[in-house]
Amino acid sequence: MRLRFTKMHGLGNDFVVIDGISQKIRLSADKVRALADRNFGIGCDQLLLVEVPTSPDVDFCYRIFNADGTEVENCGNGARCFARFVRDRRLTGKNVIRVQTASGVMVLTVDENDNVSVDMGVPVLEPAEIPFTADNRAVVYPLTVGDHDISVSAVSMGNPHAVYVVDDVDSAPVESLGPQIESHPRFPRRVNAGFMQVINSGAIKLRVYERGAGETLACGTGACAAVVAGRLRGILDDNVDVELPGGHLNIQWAGEGQPVIMIGPATSVFHGQVKI
């Protein structure tokens, strides 16, 4: 069968987006890996699937698959691309879109400049719910990674994140420590590893080694988790510019019990068909 798709990116974090409403598709892990392969497929960090809603109070169902074929709970950059996609493909004319994800309902708002604001929900900080193995909740946890003893903050933005503060993000050992943090046994569902450099109270630089994808040019949920971690540590304000390798996101968080708001662009690259 031939499958129609759109290639999109949010600050270089790239996606294959598929309309599962007007065309029928069954995605196995093998098919996802084949489509995500940058040499033999289309190539992407994640594959996003638009499906019919399963509840009357949402507009769409939003499913996310990593390049390794695993289905995951959330992706902030993908959410912005999702919002642009359903409007560009005329699946909806709404500016405010409610979508069902594996971690709950997400609200996406598209402004007149096609920037997308995403209500990412209230961050989860209880270790058992992240999930993360710890006796008690803390702002910072010691973590032994190979020969290194480091400290991380653990946050879930619908998917788990470990945030490690470094002096210089450009020289941070993302390639070596990232995979070790990702698969650390204290994170039973694996984890996204964020390396954060604080520039000042309103600006950070961030690199993220994503679970199932490796280091990407941008990670929306990672940016949210980093700002939450910085706010809890008392080193960041409630409105932060996050510089990622692919560009900038604006992250806003008023504090515990409040949702995190992420604002940034989403770009279509090309449309195509692929035989699967």
Image (cartoon, grey):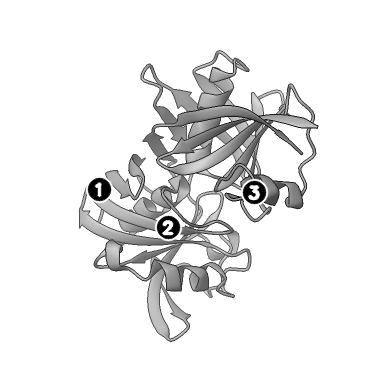
Q: Position of residue 147 (x, y in %)?
A: 43, 86
Left or right placement of residue 21 versus residue 131 in this view: right
The structure residue drawn at horizontal position 33% and vertical position 42%, both measured from the top left corner, is 247
Which quarter of the image is occupied by the C terminus?
top right
Residue 230 or residue 126, whichever sits in front: 230
Q: Secondary structure at mark 2?
A: strand
Q: Position of residue 194 (x, y in %)?
A: 41, 60
Tell me the residue at 38%/34% (across/down). Answer: 264
What kind of residue is marked 3?
Phe
* Left or right of 33 in this view: 124: left
Q: Amino acid at mark 1?
A: Asp
The mark nearer the N terminus, 1 or 3, is 3
Dot in front, 1 or 3? 3
Q: Which residue is mark 2?
A: 208
Which label sits in the foreground, 3 or 2? 3
Task: Identify whether 102 is placed above or below 192.
Answer: above
Mark 2 and mark 1 residues within 8 Å of each other at the beta carbon: no
Residue 115 lies, in percent from the top left, at 39, 26
Asked whether residue 202 appears in the rendered view, the answer is yes
- What residue is shown with label 1? 237
Distance between the Cα atoms at labels 1 and 3?
A: 44 Å
160 vs 246: above or below: below
Q: Label 2 amino acid? A: Val
Residues at badges 3 and 2 in contact (C-beta under 8 Å)? no
Residue pictured at 54% horizontal, 65% vertical: 127
Front in this rendered view, residue 143 or 213: 213
Sequence-wise, the earlier of marks 3 and 2 is 3
Residue that protrudes farthest toward the front in the picture: 39
Position of residue 52 measured from the top left corner of the image (x, y, whole percent): 72, 26
Q: Which residue is mark 3?
A: 40
| Res. 121 visible in picture | no
